[in-house]
Amino acid sequence: MNPISGLAIVMGDHVNTDILHPSWFYSLDAGKVAAGFMGGMAEKDNARALAGPRIIIAGRDFGAGSSRETTIYSLIQNDVRAIVCVSAGVIFTRNAINCGLPLFHLAEPFAAATGGAVRIEPGASRIVSASGAGAAALKPMNSHFQHILEAGGLEAYARKTGLAP
Amino acid sequence: MEEAEKGTGMARHHSLTHAILSTRAEGPLDADHYSLCAPDVLMGHDATTALAIGPMRRNGWKPKTPERLFLVADHFAPPSTPERANILRLFLDYCEEIGVRPRVNEGICHQLLAEHPGVVPGSLVAGADSHTVMAGALGAVAVGMGSTDFLIALASGKVFLNAPPCVLVRLRGRLPDWADGKEAVLELLRRHGPDGFIGQSIEFRDEDGGLPMDARLGLCNMGVELGAMNALVIPDGITEAWLRARKPLEGVIAPPPPPSPPDASDIVHAAELTLDLSALAPHLAVPPDLTCIREARDLAGQRVDQVYIGSCASGRMDDLRLAARLLGGKSVHPRTRVLVTPSSRSVYIQALEEGLVTTLTAAGCVVLNPSCGACGGIDKGLLGDGETAVTTTNRNYPGRMGSGKSRLFLAGAATAAAAAVTGVIADPREVFP
């Protein structure tokens, strides 16, 4: 997996799917889904104002709650390239990986500020701030998830492997 | 895999979940190793299935195991906006296209799974909704998932699963007569937090036979709110008796019975804890999330604008009987709206036959149709800015039931009934001595 760079959106613990993408933005209309990005966050304007690729840096229990995959769609539509967190909801994790959005777990604390440039180096299992001020190790990603990401998501993986030709 | 087992000294199956999954898996699986598993029942509802219909058609895929599909219109039936009516139409048209009978206006998919004749001890149930975990109350492995997992399960008949570490929860004592399953899960949330079991399996052993099936369903429903992949109750006499009395959902062809689940006494869980049901006290989850659980008496006096008794987390016969017993002959507080949603058509009919609907309506409650209702901000009964609700649903996140500026306190049916008559948060043991 290649390095991933972006501007950090820093979030705390227990950020659930209803905060990331409120249920009233559930839709089959991609524009409506995209508009719900971070719609339940008090500081959503800061996240939305960032120009360019974004990387979410979060704490414990990220993405708990609903299985609505529109949450992941909204992140991807708004140029979120990866998620780095202490821990994440089971279904949220699967949804992210299945949609081709890498999700990493921190092995140690990582200090970052919203808007700061960060880079994920999957080969070295670490995340670094572009300023060089901080770095942290990442836990190794499960090989099953790696295979899905390398294929471009579960749908592509299923076609590639013949699971659903 | 074998080396991993040898290296850790792990028993062949570290949980009943692991044992059941092993009967469905194409290869070995454990916490780190995923394998394709064939579900006995694959559930989708109108909202999550709708996201998979486009990719199914685009890829030219047809359902691999249509006989195992269970498709339910509950989120958008009846629809509350034209957009949701269009999504429902798409869902119903797709059901017709693939020749699968949709269950429309029959209730919430998770309650209907409990009534599904193919959901039995040892089953594997996969469903495109997080609260699919509820079916674990019957001794099944039931896992929720998103629309892409559901898409591939539709197309292939299989889903990738692992067998995560498992915690055994020994249930001791008996549930008090004012309590339901919500009280047990609120106590687990109080003790362990919403990520206390993150990524794990939870297996409950009811050692004193103190937790009735409706309460077990309510408990397992919120396994996902404890962070777990799945939650199940190890089958016992209560399970057998409940299944014997179950009136199976009409029009469903049950899949072949699953292999008998192994004797759970042979399984050595790596971690365990004890929950004394008889020592439970009424609690509420304080907004804006599930990290703060407080006793009702510590929150007493806070104004309540709406009470909601229903959803897949509640709204079963025992919940409605409890509410009717407490509210019978009383009147709801003049400023408090009280909504009741039976969880399925069969529950609704039984509540009618037992006179519960009359009792609740006479007290001033509005009994709505069986559906997801206001839970998830979907249908009638939404909250306005600054309003507060006591609700028996499963999530209290901002905006979950209407305005993002409203506040939701999660509680059991008794605490909800106490709020209904007093208009404030109150300890039901004091309101209904």
Image (spheres, coloured by chain):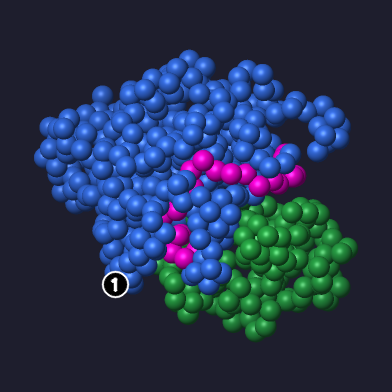
Which amino acid is tagged 1? Pro
User: Mark 1 — on which chain does it sit?
Assistant: B
Taking the image as shown, residue B40 lies to the left or right of residue B347, namely right
Residue A55 sits in which quadrant?
Answer: bottom right
Q: Residue at x 82, y 27 (%)?
A: B9
Which element carries disc 1, helix, strand or loop? helix
Residue A48 or residue B148, whichever sits in front: B148
Asked whether residue B39 is drawn in magenta, I would say yes
Question: What residue does disc 1 label?
Answer: B82
Q: Which residues are magenta?
A: B29-53
Q: Is residue B391 visible?
A: no
**Colour blue, chain:** B
Q: Is residue B215 above or below residue B189?
A: above
Residue B208 or residue B12, whichever sits in front: B12
Q: Is residue B163 visible?
A: yes
| Residue B430 spot, x, y in % from top left | 29, 29
**Colour green, chain:** A
| Residue B56 spot, x, y in % from top left | 51, 66
Taking the image as shown, residue A157 lies to the left or right of residue A45, namely right
Taking the image as shown, residue B206 lies to the left or right of residue B331, namely right
Residue B307 or residue B45, whichever sits in front: B45
The residue at the far top in this view is B208
Q: Residue at x 29, y 58 (%)?
A: B77
| Residue B318 spot, x, y in % from top left | 31, 30
Q: Residue at x 81, y 72 (%)?
A: A3
Which quarter of the image is occupied by the N terminus of chain B?
A: top right
Which quarter of the image is occupied by the C terminus of chain B?
A: top left
